[in-house]
Amino acid sequence: MRLKRTLASLLAATALSVAAPASAETTLRLLTWGSYAPENVVKLFEEKYPDIKVEVTFSNNEEMIAKLRATGGAGFDLAQPSHDRIYAAQLEYNIYKPLDMSKIDTSNMEATLLDGVKANTTIEGGVYAVPHQWGTSGLMADKTKAPEINGWDDLCDPAYKGRTSMRLKRTILLGTAFAMGEDPFAAYADLDKYQQILDQVAEKLITCKDNIKAYWKGGDDLSAMMLSGEIVASETWDSTAYRLFSENSNIVFVPPETGALAWIDTFALPRKGEADDAAYKWINFVLQPEIVKLMSASTGAIASIKGAKDLLPADKKAAVNAAFSDEDIANLKFFANIPPGVEDMEGKTLERIKAATGG
Amino acid sequence: MASNTGGDSVQHDLECSGVSKRFGSVQAVDDVSLEIPRGSFFSILGPSGCGKTTLMRMIAGFEEPDAGDIRIKGASVLGTLPNRRNVKMVFQHLALFPMMNVFENIAYGLRCAGVAKADIAPKVRAVLERVALPDVAEREIHQLSGGQKQRIAIARCMVLDPDVLLLDEPLGALDLKLREAMKIELKLLQHQFDTTFVYITHDQSEALVMSDNVAVMNDGRFEQVGAPQTLYHEPASAFVAGFVGDTNRWSGTVTKAGRGQVRAETASGLAMVCDARGGATPSAGDAVEIFVRPEFINVETGAGKSGRASATTNRLAGTVDSLLFNGANSRVLVRTEAGGLIEADVVLTGGTGDLRPGDDVRLTWSAKQTMCFAG
Amino acid sequence: MNKDIRRLTLILLFTPFALWIVLLIVIPHIGMFILSMREKVAPRVFEYGFGNYIEFANEPIYWNTLLRTGSMSLLVTAIALIIGFPVAYYIAKIAGNRTKGALFLICLIPLWVSDLIRAFGWILLLRETGVVSSSLQWLGLVDGPIEFLYNDVTVIMGLVYTVILFMIVPLVSTLDGMDNAMIEAGYNLGGNGFTVLRRIIVPYAMPGIVAGCIVVFMLTAGSYLTPILLGGKNSSWFTEQIYNQFITRYNWESGAAFGFLLLAFTSLVVWLGLKLSGQTLSSTVARS
């Protein structure tokens, strides 16, 4: 008997010490992409708001959603998924909460981006996300060695056999679909049709396998392969291409002739976030032009405010100018909202391609 | 076995001539020669580190001698691999294979020798009967008692009909009672198999009880080779006299030399007449080591003086210090007037006539039994 | 009173272990199992059933990947054993006492570096413009650059390198416990080197061999980074499949089912291995 009581009190004491409040100041727990919270920006923010402490967790779209799903939207106060990852994720897993738009300074935001994101992420009248930065996925080529790279399917050109790469993720599925003359985003409305497109894409990419040196997995291995000349062309994020451009000006970003695929990384509030005010402060803070300058230098992406391109550092600006004409900008294809179930279909297709030993 | 004996000369099962082995700066075995006649029980007796194990490992083939020759049944085995020598070995901790049962342990050697499958089982059964363990074939090693393991280790070797069986202190790990029993059993087994046993030990009583011949080894050399009785009664060196059997031992100086006999005085002042052994008769002033075995000392009750030693008998007076009762092997420790202790065998019957501590006694022993060696 | 204290000691000693087992192993597995039995019928609507397992059985890509992972893990285990055994034998039986410690330490060094760094190390060495390829060209042994990366041989090599220590450690500890006299007795009774190895050393070391094989097989089948980073276009690994189900496809239900299938599959292989080698789990665990 006595024993039980001793144990119980021991346990209680432990529990108490764990549960004790950490400190009076607010902590802003940020779930974002690598390089989206550079140290100098965090430092300036903490100087401006001394009672807020910023904790950063770096992640990517899939892991952000997986993390929030695991906790039902707890553990973080601000997340930055891409605009196409809000709607379905919210419907299925209920991990975000609507924004209080009155607390966000939208006056300086690029109107088209803001409206686009709002349209994509409004559920039952609530707006769930606002834009932060945008960028594109497209192609990258070494002009001197692969001058003929213009479209997604050029990666499968036998002229570059064993000298091209791609990431085996949904971007290349969509890009290849566009290159085949389909509009996959339109087909989201008719999943049977979309499955047909995916089947054709899979066939094409399986025969293309032989042409590929390796599937890259992250910016680092892609950069290493490209800089060493082991590959001459690849599917890429534009920011990676810009970075390589500053090291070797022969390596340029090539918007595919069917249009580069554009994504917008957003701000969204996790459903059980505990520091909403701090989160709004962060949103407004990082969209100020002088902070955008610092941020873009770190991310290589363009902020969603007016005149953002001019806030890019000189070398990145040169890279963007070398890559995009106004026509290319007009031709951008923004990722459409992913309806429920599409991830599964795409995942299966990717597995089929990976497992196929042909080609 | 007798069929391959040459008609002209006695063939030895094992001969070593001038065998030497050096490990770095240590001369482990130094110019050792031995001949072991067919079917005898030969022991190599020596303190640990004397080189006996090295010698045995050279015979088994685990070490190659630096010099000398080893012959088994007349043929040199230098350069012959251990598994090609017909010399089998019982290891100190037996080295039975724990992952095999008794049958497999014994069959292992037969299988290695390529014995036909059908012949293996009868041979194993036969050897198990000879070691009087007919029913243990299917047992696991860990199910056997210490004595049974011993016999299985021997059976495992004997099933291969070795020319020589080497035994490396196999009784060391057994408790006293079992060790005493195994001594006798080993001797009987050796008779039964009629094979040459070479037995290595540091325990002189094991060597004396079992052996036909014993080599006493010290510092890599043989001090003396002979029958147990010879070693006991006619030791060739002070080392042998001290190592084989119990003995009283003094260091002394010769006071008067004679023919075969010398008069000596120990460091503590005991004077005695001794028989010069070990070949040389020391002259006056030489240092000597003096040995007297306890069983040769007579103890008489009654006070007396340490009389001068006569030509044939030594006499000493003393007091009983303590009694060491051990049945038939009981002893008494006598403190001499000079202060040292002397051990002597006595019979303690338990009656009123027995010695008690404090009794005055007279000790006498023959000069013939007082061995002295030039130091 | 005294009994009370002894019970308290026992409970206090046992509590961390029990908590660990229950909180970190039992409860998560129960949760995963329940998850694996859910079938998604609509957003936020689930039914219970074996659907996820049936889906696995119906999709050749999945079980092919599992079989591929299993067979390559077995190959890795075999190679690790073949390379690890002589190394362990040398460390345990031939090397002197001082060298023994040093050699053991050398075996441990790769563990000081994370999996990821080790894989990147291999990439630096083996890539087309990497150290090995350039050295070969410099030596004039080959004409053009050679790509050593992105194929199954590299994956197997990388995995063997990563796990071989877990083979060597239990082998050294069993072989260390083996009396040298046992080996000498093997020769003395007429065995040649091969017989002694096959009939005495290997059977004696069997618990260590089996323990090492189990650990290596489990680690290999459950490894993620090495096969992903070194693997080629066609090389899928089952853990990657599970990751994809959980993360890219948001399909936790079938990811959980896959997790259980991997657990069942590796347990089956281990069970078969124990049966074939005549060992029991307790004997191998106790010995190593």
Image (cartoon, coloured by chain):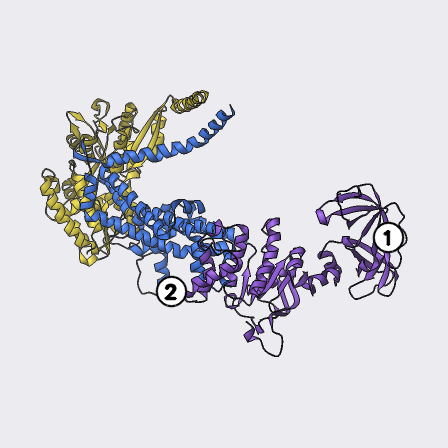
Chain colours: A yellow, B purple, C blue
- Chain holding disc 2: C
Quadrant of the rendered structure where residue A267 is?
Answer: top left
Tell me if mark 2 has few (under 14), some (14-19) or many (20+) residues whose alpha carbon lies within 10 angstroms of its own: few
The C terminus of chain A sits in image quarter: bottom left
Q: CA distance from mark 1 to mark 2?
A: 95 Å
Is label 2 in a helix, a strand or a loop?
loop
Q: Which residue is mark 1?
A: B315
Q: Amino acid at mark 2?
A: Leu
Image position, residue B362 (x, y; %): 85, 48
Q: Are marks 1 and 2 on the same chain?
A: no
- Which of these two is toward me, B29 or B139? B139
User: Compared with residue C194, is residue B145 higher up or lower down, i.e. above or below?
Assistant: above
- Which of these two is toward me, C278 or C198? C278
Which mark, by number, is residue C139? Answer: 2
Judged from this view, the residue extending furthest toward the bottom is B8
Image position, residue C88 (x, y; %): 45, 54
